[in-house]
Amino acid sequence: MMAAIREEEHYCRKCGRAITRDEAAVTKKLINRGTTSYYCAGCLADAFDVRTEDIWEKIKYYKEIGCTLFDNINV
Ligand SMILES: [Zn+2]
């Protein structure tokens, strides 16, 4: 199955920072797959009371297990 790759601009709902596709994807994982509100890694960490590094670790983990929300891997 081909995943359409679109460059959409998302901004953190809390701090307004432009966020990456990975941050948008992890927001969906952590909050709700259908969410239209996105948060940067720092604000997600705040919301879940974890460290920002933990959020990046989750992103790495989901990519490793091949989560389809993280289908556009360009690191
Ligand atoms: Zn933020």
Image (cartoon, rainbow, N blue to C red):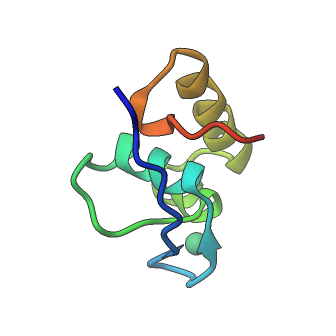
The residue sitting at the right extreme is 75
Q: Would residue 53 be found to the left or right of residue 11 on screen?
A: right
At horizontal 58% and vertical 32% (from top left) the residue drawn is 58
Residue 24, can we see it?
yes
Q: Which quadrant, please, contains the C terminus? A: top right
Residue 68 percent location from the top left of the image: 41, 30
At horizontal 53% and vertical 26% (from top left) the residue drawn is 62
Looking at the image, residue 48 lies above or below residue 71: below
The residue sitting at the bottom extreme is 16
At horizontal 48% and vertical 51% (from top left) the residue drawn is 5
Please tell me which residue lies in front, 18 or 4. 4
At horizontal 71% and vertical 41% (from top left) the residue drawn is 74
The residue sitting at the front extreme is 2
Q: Would residue 26 be found to the left or right of residue 37 on screen?
A: right
Occupied quadrant, residue 35: bottom left
Q: Which quadrant, please, contains the N terminus? A: top left
Residue 11, can we see it?
no
Numbered disc total:
0
Q: Would residue 17 be found to the left or right of residue 4 on screen?
A: right
Looking at the image, residue 27 lies above or below residue 68: below
Residue 28 percent location from the top left of the image: 36, 48
Looking at the image, residue 11 lies above or below residue 6: below
Q: Quadrant of ligand 1?
A: bottom right
Please tell me which residue lies in front, 6 or 48. 6
Residue 44 percent location from the top left of the image: 52, 57
Residue 25 percent location from the top left of the image: 46, 48
